[in-house]
Amino acid sequence: MMKVRRFSTAALATVYVAAQIESLMTREAEPVLGLATGSTPINLYRQLVEFHHQGLSFSHVTTINLDEYVGLAADHPQSYRRFMDDHLFSQIDIPLANTFVPNGMAPNLDRECDRYDAIVNAHTIDLQILGIGRNGHIGFNEPDISLKTRTHVIDLTEDTIQANARFFSTEAEVPTRAITMGIQSILQAQSIFLMAFGRDKAWAVKRALSGEVSTEVPASFLQMHPNVTFVLDAEAAVALDDPRTPYPDQENLGSRL
Ligand code: F6R
């Protein structure tokens, strides 16, 4: 059974998740965090930076990020490596050598996927942070007729490209491919906290929790994991009370099915 924690605001939900991380970090000698990028965890990272200012050290922490765009250099303003550096790593005392993000500029992407899988397999992720796409993706495991288990290169769906377009000046600049950890890599974590805020996520949250596993909603695979908590604000939880909540944009089903 997946746990669901509902909060009236995203701010409260964020404090809840930050406290889980803080507790893990003080409990474990060498904690490993699985991290996500995107809008959802930005305030989580801000909160962790605050905790750091209050004396919490990250010197013993390892982080493994879910994904990275193909074709963006580490210092590109929209790369996920840069996102993590800006929002978290540069503001805390984590050794950069302990922070892992796939290399979207690797000359041989298949080899990069193998390298990243070896990193994932060499660690046990104690606590995995996930966001969720409005189409139900986790990491960049997009809705499809089948899902890949391990780290792989994926063609982003039209829906995801459009959702990401807000960060780029033209849609042509938005990357169309990404490297992402696979579903099985994600399910290897000891505990998973999926954060979802806003009405845009309500449909995906509802489908993920629906009691059916479908490759059409990759987040539904989390139902097979023994320790998952969905951390929601009121808006993201709205469909749990109202089964008729539609997909956020009916024109664009965000799926290749
Ligand atoms: C990012 C990631 C994605 C996002 C998802 C939600 O590393 O893996 O699955 O979590 O696209 O993005 P936001 O938070 O921007 O709505």
Image (tube, rainbow, N blue to C red):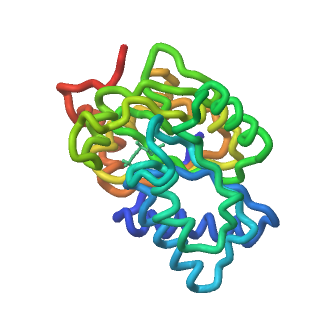
Residue 230 lies, with reference to residue 218, above or below; the image says below
Residue 62 visible at all: yes
Query: Where's residue 81, x and y in %?
Result: 52, 52
**Towards the viewer: 114 or 124:** 114
Which residue lies at the image location 36% right of the left edge and 14% below the top edge? 257
Residue 238 position, x and y percent, is: 30, 47
Residue sitting at 58 percent across and 70 percent down?
Answer: 19
Taking the view exactly as shown, the residue that stands out farthest to the left is 251
The single residue placed furthest to the bottom in the displayed view is 54
Above/below status of 233 relative to 248: below
Of the 4 image quadrants, the one containing the N terminus is: top right
Residue 77 located left or right of residue 96: left
Query: Which of the two residues, 98 or 76, is positioned nearer the viewer here?
Result: 76
Q: Check the image and report above or below for 164 versus 141.
A: below
* The quadrant where residue 39 appears: bottom left
20 left or right of 194? right
Name the residue: 77% across, 46% down: 123
Q: Can residue 4 be seen at all in this image of the molecule?
A: no
Residue 33: x and y, percent?
65, 55
Count of residue discs:
0
Q: Write the residue at 47% across / 56% down.
A: 82
Which residue extends farthest front? 107
Seen from the viewer's position, the closer of residues 96 and 248 is 96
Where on the image, by quarter, is ligand 1? top left
Q: Quadrant of residue 58?
A: bottom right
